[in-house]
């Protein structure tokens, strides 16, 4: 028999489970990027802030590649600047 049976998937096309796992991985990468960026904002150490921001950008790039499209990045903030909506923030 040459045709595909109902249970077979097209090679190279992720199935429902793979697509769900991929979305979870993208979400985890983006959440990790947010945590790293937040840590960078909270530190007074400029060198550490740069390392954390670089790692955050790497996670966002990984997520974008995995998702197959670019992910918008939040505007960078200076280390030690208050969050919008926080006392003293914009």
Image (cartoon, rainbow, N blue to C red):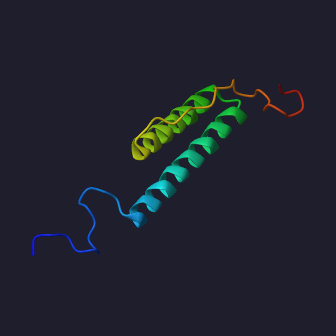
Residue 38 at what x, y percent from top left?
67, 39
| Residue 12 location (% of width, % of height) | 26, 56
Above or below residue 90? Residue 36 is: below
Q: List x then y, in percent, for residue 28.
A: 54, 53
- Tell whether 5 sits left or right of 31: left
Query: Seen from this angle, which residue lies furthest left?
Result: 1
Position of the N terminus, as image quadrant, is bottom left
Q: Residue at x 39, y 62 (%)?
A: 18
Query: How many numbered discs, if any?
Result: 0
Camera-side residue of 89 and 42: 89
For residue 30, above or below residue 18: above
In the image: residue 9, left or right of residue 57:
left
Residue drawn at the location 36% of the way across and 63% of the way down: 15
Q: Quadrant of residue 83?
A: top right
Place residue 84 in its image quadrant.
top right
Seen from the viewer's position, the closer of residues 2 and 39 is 2
Q: Is residue 35 positioned above or below 21 on the image?
A: above
Q: Is residue 24 above or below residue 6?
A: above
Q: Which corner quadrant holds the C terminus?
A: top right
Name the residue located 55 percent from the left edge and 45 percent from the top edge: 30
């Amino acid at each position: 028999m040459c045709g595909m049976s109902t249970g077979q998937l097209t090679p190279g096309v992720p199935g429902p489970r793979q697509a769900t796992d991929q979305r979870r991985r993208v979400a985890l990468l983006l959440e990790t990027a947010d945590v790293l960026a937040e840590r960078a904002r909270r530190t007074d150490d400029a060198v550490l802030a740069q390392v954390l921001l670089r790692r955050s950008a790497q996670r966002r790039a990984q997520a974008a590649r995995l998702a197959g499209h670019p992910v918008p990045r939040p505007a960078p903030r200076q280390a030690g600047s208050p969050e919008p909506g926080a006392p003293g923030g914009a």
